[in-house]
Amino acid sequence: MSDKSLSPALEPFLRHIAACNSAVLPGGRLPFFCGTEQIGWISPATAQALETLGLQRSQGFGVKVGAELFPLSRTLCEMGLYASHDEAFDVRNDNGLVLGQVDRGAIPVLGLAAEGVHLNGLVERADGLLFLWVARRSMSKRLDPGKLDHLVAGGMSAGLDPQTTVVKEAQEEAGIPAELAATARPVSRIEYALERPEGLRRDVLHCYDLLLPEGFVPVAEDGEVESFHLMPIQNVMTLVQDTDSFKFNVNLVLIDLFIRRGLFVPAEADVLRNALAGQPR
């Protein structure tokens, strides 16, 4: 399918996908290693800080063993390169093996890959209409305050897997009982790389669908959400198409949902599916 044959209505969806895959690698960055394995890409400013710590190599920078990663992340915080999140995240190699941990805030500074979960909270009404629970992020959030978000979304803290994270975040963010959250179904995995004010984001999103009873009403348990809204799926699609109301990466997960729910004609669904899958980690 040539670009000329695409519906103009498809272009806004492709714009969201392109926006999340805007980072050019290496793009002037230097490799960051743990032992002999490259695990990140660092900016010249971060490289300058690592040079003062004696971590320069013949090619790039790095630590000798994974146990050095967390102390390094704390040192970078003390040097003013980021503000601590007080939350440890696992650092994995390309085979998914955990090498060590870092403070969450150091991940974009070191250009590390990070994993998280996004959950589509769906309500299938008896009349056949599909609705989606949408959250509005608190204005006190560090990233993207006030933006629209998924019912449940969050980073994967150290020691957790995607399913455990879904259940944990569902309770904390929306008051969803563990028994109900455990029925969430894994549906896709989305990767992207983009530059953000906090640094290089190389994210891996584990996406889930959860069917909720019509009578369920989410409750913001941890203060990260300002309000919840139950919206027809077509209204959500219009918001993605016409606005930037959603947090940047939520758009990608919603486009994947629209594809799976048959809201695009097959040829256009193929274009979007390929765009979502076409960018390297």
Image: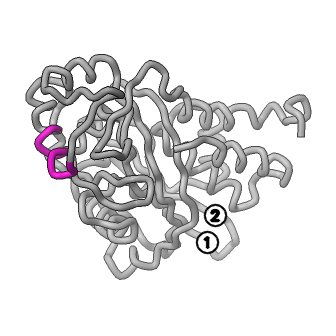
* Location of mark 2 (residue): 130
Q: Quadrant of residue 238?
A: top right
Whether residue 40 appears in magenta in the rendering, the answer is no
Q: What amino acid is found at the position of numbered circle 2 in the picture?
A: Leu
Residue 200 versus residue 13: which sits nearer the camera?
200
Structural crowding at the residue carrying mark 1, measured as other residues with C-alpha within 10 Å and reported as few (<14), some (14–19) or many (≥20): few
Kindly report the distance in space between the C-alpha atoms of the residues bearing marks 1 and 2: 6 Å
Q: Which residue is drawn at 32% across and 57% down?
A: 156
The answer to whether 3 appears left or right of 82 in the picture is: right
Could you tell me which secondary element the residue under label 1 belongs to? loop
* Location of mark 1 (residue): 125
Considering only vertical position in the picture, is 133 above or below 241?
below
User: What stretch of residues is rendered in magenta?
Assistant: 65-72
Considering only vertical position in the picture, is 191 above or below 96?
above
Q: What amino acid is found at the position of numbered circle 1 in the picture?
A: Arg
Among all residues in the image, which is located at the extreme bottom?
179
